[in-house]
Amino acid sequence: MNRLHKEILKQIQDHSDKPTKHTFLNSYLGTSHPRYAITVPALRKIAKTWMTNHPSLSATELSLLLTRLIKGDSSTEKCMAGILLDYSTPEQRKFNPKIFNTWLNELEGWAEVDTLCTGRYSETEIPSQWETWKPLLIRFSKSKNIQKRRASIVLLCSPLLKVTDERMANFALQNALQLAHEKDILITKALSWVLRSMVKRHRRLLERFMVQHKSKLPKIAVRETLTKLKTGKKTK
């Protein structure tokens, strides 16, 4: 554990109880890692303050810190890595995206994966580095690791909400078809999410896709996407 990791872990510990495992909540979050009893708003406050106090942190230093946190014992440390990314500067995000392949090996369950893979980083860096990210997403989509297959879906949710880019939209739809046969909720709910993310900026493309392929998609993805298209919400 390096000095910066220790600093952040101490902040977490100072604002929470000892890490525990809670059978019901761990099952819901999809992780077996222990968690500190601390709220997400409290974690975000810690992350925002810490990043504000370390403006000179380089991209290399940030990626090393995130690696340490993601390899930490607790789910809280792993999630903190993604939260820190939300408060990083554009320059601090310029590390090699291939490191996500290593990071995802350490994560378990939707909460840990989604905290890392959605938000300001994916919103800004995936569109701007698409030629680097596309082969990574293809690799993740074909992985035996279900966390990586989920990541191949949810990494596009934030950018699809913010950016009109048909390259990303077409990839998301192709990937949805490739993974449509899977039954695990980690995948079925993620497919619903990414399709719904396309409603605002890629409506016509999505509508054509749903007409042509809805019989192949998980029922929950079809139901929530069609409801979103009709009402603007995922459920009635």
Image: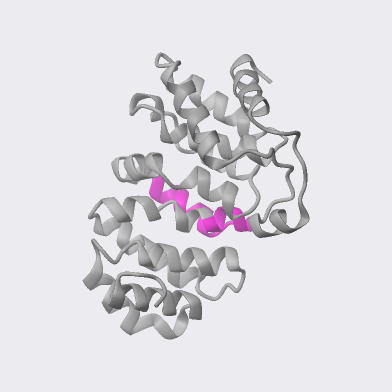
Which quarter of the figure has residue 17? Answer: top right
Task: Return the residue nearer the eye: 179 or 76.
Answer: 76
Q: Quadrant of residue 208?
A: bottom left
* Residue sitting nearer the eye, 25 or 143: 25
Relative vertical location of residue 200 with respect to residue 8 in this rendering, above or below: below
Q: Is residue 72 magenta?
A: no
Left or right: residue 89 versus residue 44 is left
- Residue beneath the point at 77% across and 47% down: 21
Residue 175 visible in the snapshot: yes
Look at the image and tell me in which quarter the C terminus lies. Answer: bottom left
Image quarter in which the N terminus is found:
top right
Classify residue 106 as left or right of residue 34: left
Instruction: State which region is magenta.
Output: 133-150
Estimate the x, y position of residue 228 in percent, counting from the top left.
34, 72
Residue occupying the point 56% across, 49% down = 113
Give x and y (percent) for residue 126. 36, 44
Residue closest to the eye, 7 or 192: 7
Which image quadrant for residue 66?
top right
Residue plotted at (73% across, 35% down): 73
**Image location of residue 39, percent across then percent down:** 58, 41
From the viewer's perspective, is 231 left or right of 136?
left
Residue 36 position (above or below residue 108): above
Q: Is residue 218 visible?
A: no
Q: Residue at x 36, y 66 (%)?
A: 196
- The spot of residue 155 in percent (x, y) is 44, 51
> Is 18 above or below relative to 220?
above
**Compared with residue 235, is residue 62 higher up or lower down, i.e. above or below?**
above
The rendered magenta stretch, by its main secondary structure, is classed as: helix
